[in-house]
Image (tube, helix red, strand yellow):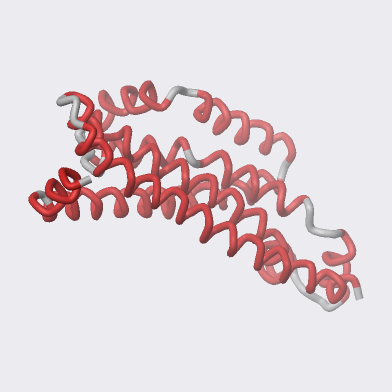
């Protein structure tokens, strides 16, 4: 334990820099994934045929092994954080797009009918009724995507993306348990923290949705 604290004290600036990179790439990947996957889910809602095509496409990407996906990015985007983020975004599309589509399908018909009875347009129903009621499921997908992103950023060190994976793989190559632990523990904490935080948001939204359902059906 003394060796661990000594190593952290001696390499504090480097560890903080790698931690910052890891957080930055994880957040960036999830945000980009949300910006792409939620509209995909909305497109799926518009047509069942389109839903099969789009969801099968992102499902196919999700089946590609992580390292293979990073490898496929190298000929297209080179080495560094850009191909790493691109690969992580592609890999995290499925849970968000699937849950967006599922959440919209799960909106009670009487809630839509009540909104139409109030004179809402299709766009207003989507923005003021369907999406709010689907938010808990959408956040469940975001939670899965966030945890996946934290782990994938670690592996992205193989293609020069940086992050805490640098410490983990350096420790493995030098057979240094201290270095491996220094890199692994923050990744573990981030993954668990993201899961707990987003799970709480998901539950809060689910409770809010349950409270709103009677209003929608009134």
Left or right placement of residue 207 versus residue 81 in this view: right
Question: With respect to residue 117, does 97 lie above or below?
Answer: above
Q: Where residue 54 appears, x then y in whole percent? A: 60, 35
Question: Which quadrant would residue 152 be assigned to in this image?
Answer: top left
Answer yes or no: is residue 78 visible: no
Q: Where residue 102 appears, x then y in whole percent? A: 71, 47
Where's the C terminus, which quadrant? bottom right
Left or right placement of residue 81 versus residue 141 in this view: left
Total marks shown come to: 0
Left or right placement of residue 191 versus residue 137 in this view: left
Question: With respect to residue 96, does 68 lie above or below?
Answer: above
Q: Where residue 100 appears, x then y in whole percent? A: 64, 50
Most foreground residue, 47 or 95 = 95
Where's the N terminus, which quadrant? top left
Answer yes or no: is residue 2 visible: yes
Q: Residue at coordinates 24% horizontally, 55% vertically from top-left? A: 20
Most foreground residue, 42 or 163 = 163
Q: Residue at coordinates 46% horizontally, 41% vertically from top-left? A: 148
Most foreground residue, 73 or 202 = 202
Question: Which quadrant would residue 199 be assigned to in this image?
Answer: bottom right
Q: Where residue 153 appears, x then y in whole percent? A: 33, 40
């Amino acid at each position: 334990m003394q060796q661990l604290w000594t190593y952290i004290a001696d390499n504090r600036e480097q560890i903080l820099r790698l931690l910052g990179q890891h957080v930055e790439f994880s957040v960036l990947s999830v945000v980009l994934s949300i910006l792409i996957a939620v509209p995909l889910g909305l497109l799926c809602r518009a047509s069942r045929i389109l839903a099969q095509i789009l969801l099968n496409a992102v499902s196919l990407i999700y089946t590609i092994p992580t390292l293979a996906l990073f490898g496929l990015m190298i000929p297209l985007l080179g080495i560094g954080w850009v191909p790493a983020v691109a690969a992580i975004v592609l890999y995290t599309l499925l849970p968000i797009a699937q849950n967006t589509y599922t959440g919209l399908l799960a909106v009670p018909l009487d809630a839509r009918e009540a909104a139409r009875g109030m004179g809402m347009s299709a766009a207003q129903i989507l923005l003021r009724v369907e999406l709010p009621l689907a938010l808990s499921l959408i956040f469940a997908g975001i939670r899965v995507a966030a945890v996946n992103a934290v782990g994938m950023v670690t592996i992205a060190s193989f293609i020069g993306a940086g992050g805490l994976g640098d410490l983990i793989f350096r420790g493995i190559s030098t057979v240094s348990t201290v270095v491996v632990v220094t890199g692994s523990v923050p990744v573990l904490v981030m993954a668990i923290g993201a899961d707990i935080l987003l799970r709480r948001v998901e539950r809060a939204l689910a409770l809010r949705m349950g409270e709103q359902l009677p209003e929608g059906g009134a």
